[in-house]
Image: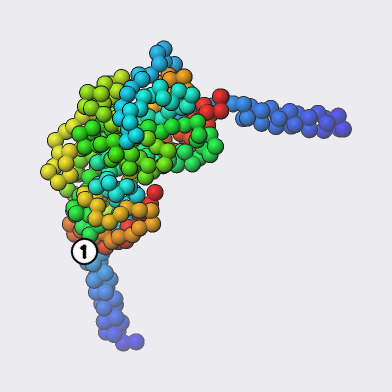
Amino acid sequence: MARWMMGLVLGMALLGLAACQSTQGPKLKVEDPWARSSPMNAEMGAIYLKIRNEGNEADALVGVQTEACKKAEIHETYQKEDGSMGMRPVAGGRVPLPPGETVSLEPGGLHIMCMGKQVPFEEGARFSLTLTFANHEPITVEVEVRK
Amino acid sequence: MQRSWKFLSLLVVVLVAGGWLFWRFRPHRFVGTVLQSPEPAYDFELTSSEGPVHLSDFRGKWVLLFFGYTHCPDVCPTTLADLARVMDLLGRDAEKLQVIMISVDPKRDTPERMAEYVRYFHPSFIGLTGTEEDIREVATRYGIFYNYPQGTPESGYIVEHTASTLLINPEGYLKVIFPPTFGPDGITPEQMAADLKYLLRR
């Protein structure tokens, strides 16, 4: 093969690789979205899931929307010195997602607070939920209601 | 040669039998904190959807007390779901146990609201509420803290409260305090059921 051709092929390959690098950035994966089943007379619900940042840049979860709730916010459960527990919105309304790590929203910790349930949170029910991030495009997942 | 083999096999049998006996009759390790209360637990009178309820109504049964409120999305449903799981794990022994949830939010939790809420998790669960004074008295007597910090207009106020579960024995004495079933120091329903199985079979 002519020398210049090899050079061209190599150059294109490197360019291709470089293009891959620039779209690397944050790569987020949402895993195991589920909601706790609760009676209809309880207006509040809790949704849990895991977010894996497979990329090499930090990102953050900044919002949640779903038709299943009048309003959805990111909350955390906390414990005081006397042992009592409470819940509050997370600072700044955002959850940092460090690169290479999985952040877990689970019972007793971070959770999505569903304020004003619009659908029954019965075991087996499903609804869609959209997560918005600082640097990533929104991700929509299907939440499964469990006991 | 014959004799040493006989001796060896006898030794193995003894070791295996001894190990099994030790395992079978080993003392149970509790995940809950076991107490020796000098006095019976406070005999409260609170309100259910079916009228007044006293702790003493349940003499002869083990009672699991949990303090929470129905506007709580994470801690309370998690605990009640886990307690329902414990009931399932206990099988026939579950008949000896009564789960009672007492509201720390009497302003919003009516007796009917409490009943509808707890029965969703298990048909046998009882939900109680009362006047603010009565609730404050019961919680204090049981060492349960609760507090109303400022809330947002949409979600209303939350209640900070102790999330432990208390076990009272059939004679009316507080016997075990279980930590929450979630969080870093949390116990599992399986562990709680193991503690209960041990006690219920006394």
Camera-nearest residue between B198 and B47: B47
Residue A43, percent from left and from top: 24, 47
In the rendered image, residue B96, in percent from the top left (x then y), is placed at 50, 31
Extreme residue in the top direction:
B38
Q: Is residue B159 visible?
A: no
Q: Outermost residue, bottom direction?
A: A2
Q: Quadrant of the C terminus of chain B?
A: top right
Q: Which residue is mark 1?
A: A137
Q: Residue drawn at (33%, 28%), measured in percent from left and top?
A: B52
Q: Is residue A143 visible?
A: yes
B93 relative to A95 in the view: left or right: right
- Relative height, residue A143 to residue B79 (above, below): below
Output the chain of dot 1: A
**At 26% across and 21% down in the image, what residue appears?**
B137
- Using residue B116 as the reference point, say whether residue B198 is left or right of it: right
Q: Nearer the viewer, residue A54 or A119?
A: A119
Q: Residue at x 33, y 22 (%)?
A: B44
Q: How many marks?
A: 1
Residue A69, quarter of the rendered image: bottom left
Percent across and percent down for residue B107 are 20, 34
- The residue sitting at 29% across, 24% down in the picture is B139
Please tell me whether mark 1 sits on a helix, a strand or a loop: loop
